[in-house]
Amino acid sequence: MIRKLFIVLLLSSVTLGEAKKSFLSFPDVEKTEILFFTKTEETVVVRSSYRGKQPNSSYLFVQLEDPKMLQVVNVTKTSLDVTNFTINLVTVEDGETHLTVQLWDSTGRQERLIEEIKNVKVRVLKPSQDNLFQASSPIDGNILMLFLPMILLNKCAFGCKIELQAFQTVRKRPLPIILGAIIQFFLMPFCGFLLTQILALPEAQAFGFVMTCTCPGGGGGYLFALLLEGDVTLAILMTCTSTLLALIAMPANSYIYSRMLGLSGTLYVPVSKIMSTLLFILIPISVGMLIKRRSPEKASFLERIIRPLSFILMFVGISLTFRMGFVFLKTVNLEVLLLGLLVPLLGLSFGYFLAKISMLPLPVCKTVAIEGGVLNSFLAFAIVQLSFSQSDADLASAAPFTVAMCCGCEMLLILLLYKAKKRCILIMEEKRKKNPPI
């Protein structure tokens, strides 16, 4: 969880401050459009294939449902031969309104309507000092730097728990890793695409969910594998393997599903972020394995502190995710929240079911389920922020943040129920020992 936040903080300084434009296109008139404005001044580019008989014969008419919320500064034609226009807007107050764009042609005294885009939904969220996503980033960065030694120590402690014999077992029986790859890179993206079509989400937001579903396992996976008594060594190996496979699977899935959703343009795949994620896991864990081999006493100490340390980092990670994702929660509707709840549950269900019917041991079943449900969803955040216009990127970014927050809450609930169940079983066993049946 914390590793995910580290990637977000690196991205926020680069991507969130960049000025990007929103695009509307007249051939896409039948598609549902949603523009998400977060800056005081916004720009919308309108494209059309129409060519007037005379230069400057066509013009654009922009109608706003609520001028108190959003105002048009000017409309500029960007070229003479191609009918492209730039609309400069100023946001006045927060809320939701609609925008209608009409392309007219004026020849002599006659005017005729050429094309029209009706009721484009616009959500305005003006930047302010209490905007948690912008204001909390430096604070969260300081908190992250404070907890960074704990994060590295925790990963090092996980390295001390790795059993080298388990690697040999996985090498001979790689079925859990194969199942994890099938779930993460085939089943989950397809189900994410299917659900977004059933709920009729906008294209950019649908793509955000599909990319979240095709992300590799997150660092929180082996943490929950430890707390839920799964196979920790297998969890670490599955996370590293899925992160490595993501270098191929994420570009392939982004290409396939972007075409299926009707999106065009160059999609950014954060190869450097994926590699840094992999190194951030492998280096401290390798150090832990070396400590276990050279100094068993220190390794024993690290293994004793791993549980309390993991609990602390888990709660810190969830709280920071909520702080940074608060701005996106303001844009979330019921469909997005429903998908955010369903995505981790689908991954958990697929993992446990496939592992169970494959006759794998219970700890392995738990691990495959956790790796399928706990995703490194902020890699999807990197893709949508660097691939789309700002309004589409902000709209699509609600998906990975919603999934991350819902996943943290769901896994915490599962952990509490699991601990409560174990506690009840222990109490019942103690009662049986004190009062044995006659």
Image: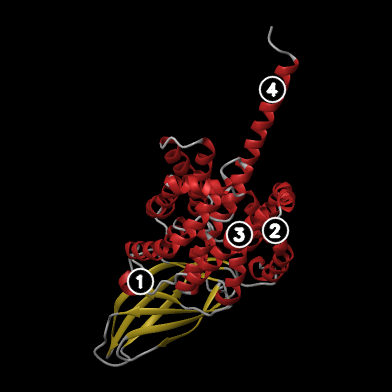
Between the C-alphas of marks 1 and 2, the distance is 43 Å
Q: Where is residue 169 in the image (x, y as percent from the top left)?
A: 48, 45
Residue type at numbered disc 1: Ser
Task: Say which quarter of the image contains residue 142.
Answer: bottom right
Sequence-earlier tag: 1 or 2:
2
Q: Position of residue 76 (x, y in %)?
A: 42, 87
Residue topped by disc 1: 264
- The residue depicted at 30 percent of the width and 77 percent of the height is 113
282 and 432: which is toward the camera: 282
Residue topped by disc 4: 428
Residue topped by disc 3: 286
For disc 1, the neighbor class at 10 Å (few under 14, some 14 to 19, many from 20) is few
Between the C-alphas of marks 3 and 4, the distance is 41 Å
Between the C-alphas of marks 3 and 1, the distance is 42 Å
**Which quadrant: the C terminus?**
top right
**Secondary element at image label 1:** loop
Question: Which mark is on residue 153?
Answer: 2
Task: Say which quarter of the image contains residue 196.
Answer: bottom left
**Secondary element at image label 2:** helix
